[in-house]
Amino acid sequence: MAGTKGKRDRVILAYSGGLDTSVMVHWIQEKYDLDVITFTVDLGQGEDIEAIRQKALNTGAVEAIALDAKNLFVDCFVWPALMAGAIYEGKYPLATALGRPLIAKLMVDAARQHNAKAVAHGCTGKGNDQVRFDMTFQTLAPDLRIIAPVREWKMTRDEEIAFAIERNIPVNISKDNLFSIDQNIWGRSCEAGVLEDPWIEPPPETFAWTKDVAHTPNDPAYVVIDFDKGIPVGLDNKKMDGVELISNLNKLAGEHGIGRIDHVENRLVGIKSRELYEAPAGVVLHFAHREMESLTMSKQAQRFKSIVSQEYADLIYNGQWFSAFHQDLAQFVVSSQRFVSGQVRMKLFKGSASVVGRKSENSLYSKNLATYEKGDQFDHDAAKGFIRLWGLSQQTQAQLQLLKGGKGFELPGILTDKSNNK
Ligand code: ARG
């Protein structure tokens, strides 16, 4: 290999250091006759990327790049998704889905820098991640050839291990191989193995970030989250950057068993799959953020925002981060957050987070209007006229149609239609 170094075209390979991507370093060189430059990004997955870089070089990469993109990930991907309230199918805070477009974008940058002609990733041919990678490559750099070895090589696990052993690639079958795992600072995704049976309760080995409630503290923890225009900026009155804030909250909420999500989800490629997520900070922050909005946003804005949240979650899940539609939705979201500042107080206890307080300088909550005590300023007399007009069309329809000729009001529901019941 050394003799050909630098002479061949190059490919940028997304490299995690696991068996698949290590085998790829060799497979791509042999099959495509390309020099492999590996690319490893720290998105807060808690691995030593310098060690992974060394491993890549030992495995035969001509160059190995390792980048810390944690801040970029939080500021430009996680916070926008949080502000948007983006949770896929009401459950999944989208950690993996948010990481992919960033990794792919950074790979395109690296390809330009190193004059590479191709990019490669280790996604399978039946998941969502291949879509997110390929969509990003195809959108930002349609000239780059995309290589997806796992999608192409069609090796069984045993064949892959044999391939690795023949080429002296270290193979360690550890407990991690029980599942397929992806993690970054926003969450941990765990699937396959026994989890493929949606009836089976996840065994303890499934979880790494959250305690079983059987072992969580018997006293609750309280945490105050500071928001500035929809973005979390501090915990317990201490300002901190996003990475620090999420890391602290992952630990604290995980310690109380918060953030486990068991999701049978609808993949973009048409199948249902079962994934176990852990997102302690994600769960607490989405909850707190909605509470901040409930205090500071109008009813109409909140309703409309919930539609936007769903669209936003879908576009993230479906690989459309780099779209004009996303830019447009993001403008709306940012604008919608201009009064979403203040504090939310959360209680963390035995696997669940609850809100116990909220306050804001932009609060729309008026004690004088809401109170049942002294100082009530709500105009009770105005209610009477309001209801007369609010109910006018319903009253009219009842008289002219529903109750016409002395009929009684027919209750909706299956019990009222006896005639079909013979
Ligand atoms: N189902 C999630 C998604 O499509 C996570 C995919 C990766 N999961 C994994 N365990 N490797 O975003």
Image (tube, grey):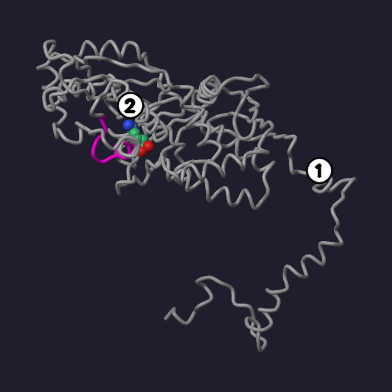
Identity of the residue furthest to the left in this view:
166
Residue 416 position, x and y percent, is: 53, 76
Magenta span includes 191: no
In the picture, measured across the screen, residue 322 lies left or right of residue 285, that is: left
Mark 1 or mark 2: whose residue is earlier in sequence: 2
Q: Nearer the viewer, residue 371 or 307?
A: 307
What crowding class fits label 1: few (fewer than 14 Cα within 10 Å), some (14-19), or many (20 or more)?
A: few
> In the image, what residue type sits under mark 2?
Met
Q: Quadrant of residue 112?
A: top left
- Please give the range of residues in magenta: 120-132
Q: Classify mark 2: residues with Cα within 10 Å, few (<14), some (14-19) or many (20+).
A: many
Question: Where is mark 1, residue-wise?
Answer: 367
Q: Nearer the viewer, residue 324 or 200?
A: 324
| Image quadrant in which the C terminus is located | bottom left
Dominant secondary structure of the residues highlighted in magenta in the image: loop
State ligand 1's quadrant: top left
Q: Is residue 60 above or below residue 209?
A: above
